Amino acid sequence: MAEERHIRSLEAAPSRIYGELCSGKTAKFDQKLVHLLTSAAEVFAAHGYEKASIRQVAQSAGVSLAGLYHYVRCKEELLFFMQYHTFGVLIERLEALLEKPAAPEAHLREMVSSHVHYLAEHLPELKLCTTELDSLQGEYYEKVLSRRQRYFDLTRGILKKIGRHSSRVDPTLATFYLFGMLNWLVMWFDPSRNEPGKISKSLVELFLSGYERASGPGGAA
Amino acid sequence: MAEERHIRSLEAAPSRIYGELCSGKTAKFDQKLVHLLTSAAEVFAAHGYEKASIRQVAQSAGVSLAGLYHYVRCKEELLFFMQYHTFGVLIERLEALLEKPAAPEAHLREMVSSHVHYLAEHLPELKLCTTELDSLQGEYYEKVLSRRQRYFDLTRGILKKIGRHSSRVDPTLATFYLFGMLNWLVMWFDPSRNEPGKISKSLVELFLSGYERASGPGGAA
């Protein structure tokens, strides 16, 4: 599993995690921390990030408050790790699929499928990545922004290759449109009613057909 | 101006406004209230809705706290009026353009253009409509939801007409994709760099070309 590899590739250093991130080392997210992040995502999604307390997260995760503080310093650090970890997994999966030789259209189909399937299994985390962009500050914000930008740039790279032959829509604009379609999923996707495979196929086919054939103005706006 | 007509068609009843909405009468949003809503949108967008105080809104609008309470009972009511008013204007504009006989593709182009131009002029309000869906409760939430649903349904009606002839993508899914592209604009649209006319053209041409020609699965997911 790409995710498990990602988790193992990060360094488990309870209470030193953030310091080591800042010093440029990677931090291992051990299973316990991933469990805490999942609980935090559910609590934040249910009560709203601003209103939720770190005590509610500890209760939901079944750990003591002291146990939680062993891993994170504050509520903001939980939100930071959640977003940092989520984009880390998404980037790792995208890089892995880009390593396989394929046409850029096939890469885009796989990217969208990977994203929608991960979202279907981690809806609270993805919702927080979408709606709580601005709740992080300083170094937390910068580190997440850097991964968001990397994910965006990798995707734009695929669209540039496709557009070189056929599209008149600026690849950067098209990437914003694609992420609009993907990110808005958190507002309506219902795992009990929607199949990730069907959704990702209809989304990417609509996008690809439109991107390859649109006759609108081509330059950046 | 459609917006001015909208404002006049609502009833200005300081401190009674919400009660009259609940009793089924419409409330006139006079110029003073629209000014307060604009100030509130800027304050909420700058500080975050949860963190912003009603005192900051009064200061930004240049009125006393007592003057502000003449119009609204609480911060949530400001957010309610802002969203209710914004969707009211968007619906009124959409209904007006649908009254003009035209092909559904032309109606969609006009809808997207109208939406993007309004967004470019009211970015803080549109951002709050997008990111603070869940900050309203009870009757506030229901009344805004009803207008959101009306706006969605009118747009889906256009896509249904287009899709009847040519699309294999479910119109409801396609409407979610279109609103994803439109709503995500609040995250990256920069009025000092992006021209609303160019953005709306490239967005709607990509969407329309994709919707009309996509060969993905057609059924609802």
Image (tube, coloured by chain):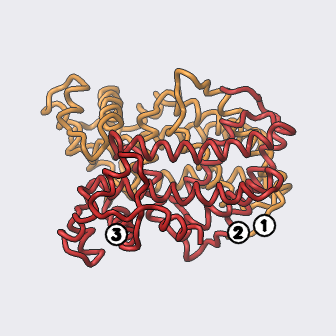
Chain colours: A red, B orange
- Asked if the residue at tag 1 contacts the one at tag 2, i.e. Cβ–Cβ closer than 8 Å, the answer is yes
Q: Disc count in the image?
A: 3
Q: How crowded is mark 1: few (under 14 residues within 10 Å), some or many (20 or more)?
A: some
Taking the view exactly as shown, the residue that stands out farthest to the left is: B66
SS of the residue under disc 3:
helix
Marks 2 & 1 on one chain = no
Marks 3 & 2 on one chain = yes
Residue drawn at x 60%, y 40% as measured from the top left: B94
Amino acid type, callout 3: Leu
Q: How far is the residue under mark 3 from the one under mark 2?
A: 31 Å
Residue A73 x %, y %: 24, 56
Q: Nearer the viewer, residue B34 or A83?
A: A83
Residue A71's place in the image compared with B101, above or below, is below
Residue designated by label 2: A198
Residue designated by label 3: A36
Amino acid type, callout 2: Lys
The quarter in which the C terminus of chain B is drawn is bottom right
- The quadrant in which residue A156 appears is top right
Reading the chain from its start, which is encountered first: label 3 or label 2?
Answer: 3
Residue drawn at x 78%, y 46% as measured from the top left: A210
Confirm whether residue B124 shows in the render: yes
**Of the numbered discs in the image, which one, if any, rests on residue B217?**
1
Q: How far is the residue under mark 1 from the one under mark 3?
A: 38 Å
Q: Depth-wise, is mark 1 or mark 3 nearer the camera? A: 3
Residue B168 x %, y %: 81, 61
Q: Which of B51 and A40 is in front in this view?
A: A40
Chain identifier of the residue bearing label 3 in the image: A
Q: Residues within 10 Å of mark 3 (few under 14, many from 20)?
A: many
Q: Depth-wise, is mark 3 or mark 2 nearer the camera? A: 3
- The quadrant in which residue B163 appears is bottom right
SS of the residue under disc 2:
helix
